[in-house]
Image (tube, rainbow, N blue to C red):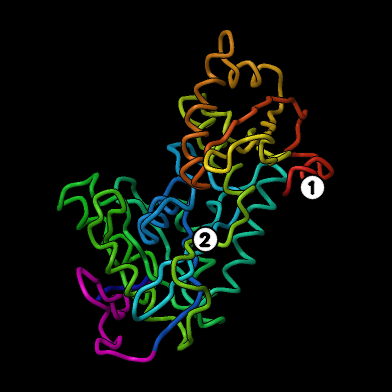
Amino acid sequence: MGTDSTGQARESSPLVTGGVPSGQPTGQSAYRAGFACLVGRPNAGKSTLTNALVGQKVAITSSKPQTTRHTIRGIATTDRAQLILVDTPGLHKPRTLLGERLNDLVRETLLEVDVIGFCLPADQRIGPGDTFIAKDLAELRTVRRRPVVALATKTDLVDRERLAEHLIAIDRLGDWDAIVPVSAVSGEQVAEVRDILSSYLPESPQLYPDGVLTDEPEAVMIAELVREAALEGVRDELPHSLAVVVEEMVPREDRPADSPLLDVRVNVYVERPSQKAIVIGRGGSRLREVGTNARRGIEALLGQKVFLDLHVKVAKDWQRDPKQLQRLGF
């Protein structure tokens, strides 16, 4: 039992340390398939958990906030359920038109999914951003009847005492259908999270064939891989200013059939000349490093050799310009 803000007793959310939450089916039942959305403030571990649940990289990760710009669908298929994960940008107090559009994207997504996972990193205290999101989710849970599972992410970064404190704080934050501690990095409780989220999906046949891990177009995935590589090791203000557009993907002519090569031309947009200098680096060293790291990921994604042609361009204040936002895919 817990208490609400008036001191009245209320039922605590079921804490899950293995298996499924109390009241959920445990035996073999009809196949389930549907959509789940992971939400949370920026850098709450949503993308890393998406990748862990799918078993392969489908969403970019970074230590920088606001890494995710698009909803990436990762598909986790088992013999009992197909869980289609929609990874969203972190909800935050917007400072630009881009920020407002990203928040709108999250809220639109929440209305369309079958279950919501609320990510709250164990290495950080519950803050105003979490409270802001919890209020939005409370309305969805009570009015829209969307189940919400609270996920204590990044448990590998804290000891048992700190984790216990965090779980109590999560329980006091709101009413949840379940509370699950999980570490996407170590893999602890990842299978439990997948099973719990799947238990709230409707009965349905598979929505995607076996082996399909995402329905994102290749160009979008390539752009995200370039953004991820460009975000590593740069100043804090730069992630908000980076946009990546794949301009062209063309097979190289006159290549032998057993050794194809794909020419990929990509533009990286920043808002100021000083940011362009950061991305390029002294003598182009940083851009070469970005290209090497991104190409490695792109070749793994496509299963073939790639020639990556990167260009850095300035689109002044694009985050605040509706026309430029549209041109860059937002």
Q: Give the residue displayed 58% in from the left and 18% down from the top.
A: 278
The image shows residue 241 at horizontal and vertical percentages of 64, 33
Measuring 68% from the left and 28% from the top, which residue is drawn there?
270
Tell whether 61 sits left or right of 273: left
For label 1, the residue is 326
Which of the marked residues, 1 or 2, is nearer the chain's N terminus?
Answer: 2
- Dividing the picture into quadrants, the one containing residue 82 is bottom left
- Is residue 229 part of the magenta span, yes or no? no
Overall secondary structure of the magenta section:
loop
Which residue position is annotated with label 2? 214
Number of other residues with Cα within 10 Å of mark 1, as a class: few under 14, some 14 to 19, many 20 or more = few
Q: Helix, strand, or loop for circle 1?
A: helix
133 is higher (above) or lower (below) than 237: below
Question: Which numbered circle lies on residue 257?
Answer: none
Depth check: 166 or 29 in front? 29
Residue 27 shows in this picture: yes
Q: Nearer the viewer, mark 1 or mark 2?
A: 2
The residue type indicated by label 1 comes to Gln
Q: Which residues are drawn in magenta?
A: 6-30
Picture quadrant of residue 306? top right
The residue closer to the viewer here, 80 or 121, is 80
Q: For residue 103, which quarter of the picture? A: bottom right
Decide if residue 66 is in sight here: no
x and y percentages locating residue 73 in the rendered image = 53, 61
